[in-house]
Amino acid sequence: MQAALIDTRRYVATPEGIELELALAGPVVRALAWSVDFFIRFGAALGVWLVVQLLGMAGIGVMLLAWFALEWFYPVYFEVTRGGATPGKRVFGLTVVQDDGTPVTWQSSTIRNLLRTVDFLPLLYGFGLASMLLSGEFKRLGDIAARTVVAYRRDLQHLSTVPAAKPLAPPLPLTLDEQRALIDFAERQVLMTEDRSHELAEIAGPALLGEHHTHPQARLLQYANFLVGRK
Amino acid sequence: MRQEAFVEKFAPLWDEFERWLLRFEGKNKKGALPARGLSAAEIPHAYRTLCQHLALARERSYSPLLVARLSELSLRGHQHLYGARLRVGAQVLNFIAGGFPQLVRREWGWVWLAATLFFGPMLVLIFSLQVYPDFAYTVLGSEQVQAMEQMYDPASRVIGKEREADSDFTMFAFYIWNNVKIGFQTFASGVLFGLGTLFFLIYNGTVIGGAAGYLHYIGYGKTFWPFVAGHSAPELIAIVISGAAGLKMGWALIAPGQLPRGRALAAVAQPAVRLMLGAAALFVFAAVIEGFWSPHTFVPIEYKIGLGIGLWLVILTYLVFAGRRGH
């Protein structure tokens, strides 16, 4: 595969002899997910506090216990029972998995979330950020110790934005790179002027376009529709 | 084989496999996908076939979207077939019955080191303050000394006063929130090459020893010792065990042996976090005693001291002997 290229993917070799691909999530999107989680926790704590107002002195105890649970076990609970994602991570399509692509175990989830204490130092996840940038796989210290990575959850529906056209099989087999080029071209056609897309489409040449190419870009769009599996 | 033929021939298998995945993941809404589906016995074979199709599709440069679909199905299959099973109930029971004491004994070196770092300063201070009591002001600061004097003054009886049940609960919650956090910090800061753990162990040992030594010297021992006796065993042992777990992680970073530092850390993190969770359970136990038993004065002092000593014996016996047979 293309592991040699600099990109944010992790390849996992399985016993069946194939490689699975995980698209790793970087610091920015993870910080955003963390902020969403922070507001959810804050909201929950506020909710408990309002209820507690009715209970008097014992209420402070409930408040402390609730805050303790929210602080330490909110991420563990969601990561273990809700497919590796806290609500914040879910919003951004992220999920926590083990290095080998299997679901995160409760031990690993506990490790990575207890070590947040250190990742947070000296302030606002300073160590965590440094560790993410140095590790090459966006692992904060907790991820290194727990053998976990944060990856994007795949959603095939949103993978392609090729405009619809009548699908047509290309007249000759194409390499993977050629196929990708065709699909990318089709996705970006809407952003270009008619003349420019015509000009670019002609590069494909007569072998692919056939003899009559008054609208080569339309023909390429048909191929792209075929390549993304439309019928 | 061209892509259309390939898809036409094998798509039914992929759909079947996806149906099984959805059912397994509990996401199959009623009627969304018709029943029939693969039986459990057919799954491994279907999965291997799927993996083979993925490899073929990649090799033959079929369209990226087809490869992505197969890749996604394989990943989900991989997660279900190779993922760890979650049977928390049984695991927790096994852990309490023997797993935790076994682990503590396996890591006895770290436990002894942590105990020395924690109890050492504590005992030194308790005894030295009997001779040089003014040293307490250096260790604790004068404000804290005054606050303590007020709190444990036998005349003021704040600590001895019978309080309401809901205030017991509040204190219990406070001890959970505060003490377990100290435990977690002692553990987690071990990742800083052990320095954080070292600091927390020595610092807490010093403060606790300073307080105990000074209060004993000025004659407030008869309110102080009965108050702390009950929860002393679980709480102090829990700090030591959190510290042992942190030191173990720190040492993996200092001397990783033949592994890269990250891998060495990952290798010890699992046993370390299990130690920490056992310690957390002890902290919770301590908080129950500290919240609901320790502050009450209707129990005679001898009973409170007796229970304290009893708990030391019980917990140490548990750590030394539990889980030696079986497994």
Image (cartoon, coloured by chain):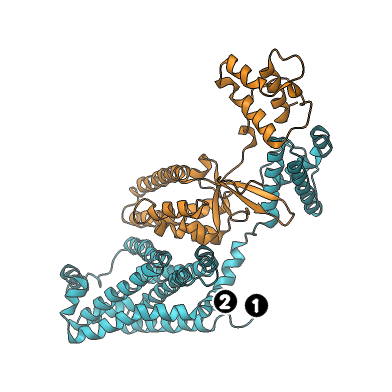
Which of the numbered marks, if any, corresponds to residue B327?
1
Other-residue count near label 2 (Cα within 10 Å), few / some / many at <14 / 14–19 / ≥20: some
- Determine contact: label 2, label 1, CB under 8 Å: yes
Q: Which mark is residue B98?
A: 2
Residue B238 x, y percent position in the rendering = 42, 73
Q: Secondary structure at mark 1?
A: loop
Task: State the separation of the CA atoms marked 2 and 1.
Answer: 9 Å
* As drawn, B200 above or below B76: below
| Viewer-side residue, B196 vs B33 | B196
Q: Which colour is chain B painted?
A: cyan
Chain coloured orange in the rendered structure: A
Query: What's the residue at 28%, 84% (across, down)?
Result: B124
Please give the name of the residue rendered at 41% of the width and 72% of the height, measured from the top-left corner: B243
Q: Please state if A172 lies on the left or on the right of B304 as rendered.
A: right
Q: Is residue B166 rendered to the left or right of residue B74?
A: left
Mark 1 surroundings: few (<14), some (14-19) or many (≥20) residues within 10 A: few
Q: Residue flagged by tag 2: what amino acid is it?
A: Gly
